Amino acid sequence: MKTEAVGLEAQLAEARRTISADGYPMSIGELTNMYKSGELIVRPEFQRFFRWTSLQKSRLIESVLLGIPIPSIFVAQTEDGKWELVDGLQRVSTLLQLQGELDTGEGKKMTPLVMEATSYLPALEGKVWQSEDQSESLSEAQRLDIKRSKLDIKIIKRESTPATKYDLFQRLNNYGTPLTSQELRSSLLVAVSSDFFAWMERMASYPAFVESTLLSDRLVEERFDLELVTRFMVLHNRPTNRFTLTLLRDLPRLLDDEIVKMATLSGSAIAQLEHVFKTTFVFINQSGGPDVFRKWDPQRSQFRGSFLSTSFEVFALGIGYQIANNNPYQQGLLAVVKEFWSRPEMQSGFATGRSTEARLAEFVPLGREITAE
């Protein structure tokens, strides 16, 4: 029993060394001034996650005006002492937009918030921070009330490890309304390394990748393109013996953990990943483009439908594996694609009732086999 207690104390001491935190109340006016002076960083990459409706934003302002406590805002201190927003994007962005201070990331200000009627304050309908028509504006007293209202700020100090921001954001997301898997993953990456996230965005915009996957506008809006880049980076060179259903269980968490580790790789390692990615998709785009990721119908002798994840897992990950390991690979890729879809087991219903993990466990090793020369 005593040994266990000592072990726990040692673990607590070690964990506390990785997490250095502070916290204190700060007025909305002070936080706004920090944002305006560049001391509070709300990454432009985060703005895609600013998705509250006008009514949700208006309810936040209602809470501030009524003195209802607002959940804590979490920031991480950067090496130069600035604060980077880790959790609280919707709340902070709403307060900045209300005042006409929220930057779109393109050097322009977002259109100031026009509020809607709320349960307790129906007269908020049509109100703005300030306008020439005083009937549409909050009064000076109301504006001062908002500026002087306090927010609880939790600060992850710069002594903390980079992984702390990742773990914190993940836990915070689990307490509230969850983001999608890719939205959470993107937010984690921005928190850990905004430069790495920007690099991932560049890969998702790489012409050969965009042209060969040819995703719908809806899928791009949902950031499935970034999901595919993540899957490629994490899985294309994963050892074949690690594609078992047991080891792939909880794929979203696996992708989270592995891509965050990649964010700390050296510049030369990132350059090698970029080389493999670009070489893979240039080859695929030249070898059939979108058809590589569509289903071949042997009865009609034509490619049908739209992008299929199965095809991506077989052919993109298969070719990527060969390139990463300097292996020769099939130059007549479209013929390999047709042969794959002509197999009896690949006819209708091949994926019915199967999890993503089960599909990966079968098709990634198969892809490596059939794309090898």
Image: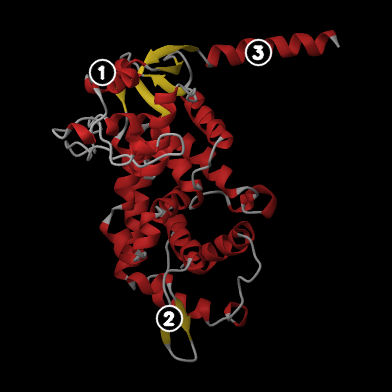
- The residue located at (40%, 71%) in the rendering is 292
Task: Tell me the SS state at disc 1.
Answer: helix
Depth-wise, is mark 1 or mark 2 nearer the camera? 1
Q: Is residue 82 visible?
A: no
Residue 354 against residue 266 in the figure, above or below: below
Q: Mark 1 or mark 2, which has the lower sequence index? A: 1
Label placed on residue 304: 2
**Which quadrant would the N terminus be assigned to in this image?**
top right
Depth-wise, is mark 1 or mark 3 nearer the camera? 1
Task: Tell me the SS state at disc 2.
Answer: strand
Q: Can you identify the residue that label 3 sits on?
A: 12
Location of residue 326 (image quadrant)? bottom left
Q: Can you identify the residue that label 1 sits on?
A: 33
Marks 1 and 3 close (CB-CB < 8 Å): no
Residue 305 vs residue 281, the one in the foreground: 305
Q: In the image, what residue type sits under mark 2?
A: Arg
Residue 161 vs residue 328, the one in the foreground: 161
- Residue 153 in percent (x, y) is at 44, 17
Residue 29 against residue 134 in the figure, above or below: above
Q: Using the numbered discs, state the Cα–Cα distance from disc 1 to disc 3 in whole angstroms.
A: 37 Å
Q: In the image, what residue type sits under mark 3?
A: Leu
The colouring scheme, among rainbow, by chain, secondary structure or one colour, is secondary structure
